[in-house]
Image: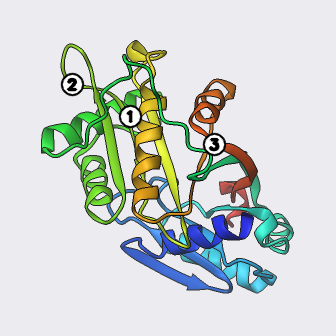
């Protein structure tokens, strides 16, 4: 699965508005933000970069004033991590990823399961962007650009789903990328703190996963942030399959 997930990462980055390929790496950039989570690179499966290749990649980020950063499945390209370490890259995080297939998917059956909807209006996209910003503790601020990215995901072959709050607005939601290489990535599953423990995360995860299978994806994968969320995803049918590594070059090593 590592090769498939890494091949997906490459294809997904190639969808970005600005793409640069150099020395076995693909870098994808979003000009409307300097967020490191939306501007990063990933290696081609099996890549074996030289020191010169890594230096060229660092230059691609430097010329844009961005943090050199990569996300990848290390087992899909074993030669990449040592080359990055030699250049001074440090670990931000290492996340286990989980995979669901049509055989393992378990849809919620409780009568009180939250109603999952597809955003259609500007207000709904903006409401979901604000809900996810709150859910993730302010890692990013709600913005018109964020709402526009959600709309683009929905209209470019991916999927966006949300659950309304009882008093109005959005309680939580998630997104899923358009499929590539036979799989799709489900991301940004978030619920506002006031509405947690009500089945929202499980409901939107199941709905998005089912949607991707209906569109022909053979699997859907995601990463989890803690044991609580892992249990939610496992109830829906996700199972551990590998690890993804996040690395960046500290500012002190960019001279």
Query: In x, y percent, where is residue 175?
Result: 40, 47
Residue at x 64% of width, y 79% of height: 25
Is 19 positioned to the left or the right of 125 in the image? Answer: right
Question: Splitting the image into 4 quarters, where does residue 84 fall?
Answer: bottom right
Q: Nearer the viewer, residue 106 or 226?
A: 106
Q: Which mark is residue 5?
A: none
Residue 34 visible here: no
Query: In x, y percent, where is residue 136?
Result: 47, 31
Residue at x 61% of width, y 64% of height: 68
For the residues bearing labels 2 and 3, Cβ distance under 8 angstroms? no
Whichever of labels 3 and 1 marks the residue nearer the N terminus, that label is 1
Residue 29 visible here: yes
Q: Which mark is residue 169?
A: 2
Q: CA distance from mark 2 to mark 1?
A: 12 Å
Query: In x, y percent, where is residue 141?
Result: 35, 37
Q: Residues within 10 Å of mark 2 (few under 14, many from 20)?
A: some
């Amino acid at each position: 699965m590592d090769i498939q997930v890494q091949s997906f990462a490459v294809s997904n980055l190639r969808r970005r508005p600005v793409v640069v390929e150099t020395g076995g790496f693909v870098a994808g950039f979003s000009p409307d933000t300097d967020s490191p989570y939306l501007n990063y690179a990933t290696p081609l499966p099996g890549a074996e970069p030289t020191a010169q290749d890594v230096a060229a990649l660092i230059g691609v980020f430097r010329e844009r004033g961005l943090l050199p950063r990569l996300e990848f499945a290390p087992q899909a390209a074993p030669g990449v991590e040592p080359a990055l370490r030699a250049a001074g890259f440090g670990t931000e995080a290492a996340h286990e990823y989980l995979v669901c297939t049509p055989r393992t998917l378990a849809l919620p059956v409780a009568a009180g399961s939250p109603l999952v909807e597809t955003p259609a209006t500007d207000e709904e996209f903006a409401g979901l962007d604000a809900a996810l910003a709150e859910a993730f503790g302010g890692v990013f601020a709600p913005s018109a650009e964020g709402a526009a990215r959600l709309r683009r995901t929905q209209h470019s072959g991916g999927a966006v789903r949300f659950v309304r709050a009882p008093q109005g607005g959005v309680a939580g939601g998630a997104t899923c990328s358009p499929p590539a290489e036979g799989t799709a990535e489900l991301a940004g599953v978030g619920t506002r703190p006031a509405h947690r423990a009500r089945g929202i995360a499980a409901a939107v995860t199941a709905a998005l996963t089912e949607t991707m299978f209906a569109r022909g994806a053979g699997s859907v994968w995601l990463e989890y942030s803690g044991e609580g969320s892992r249990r939610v995803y496992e109830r829906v049918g996700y199972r551990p399959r590998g690890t993804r590594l996040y690395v960046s070059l500290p500012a002190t090593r960019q001279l």
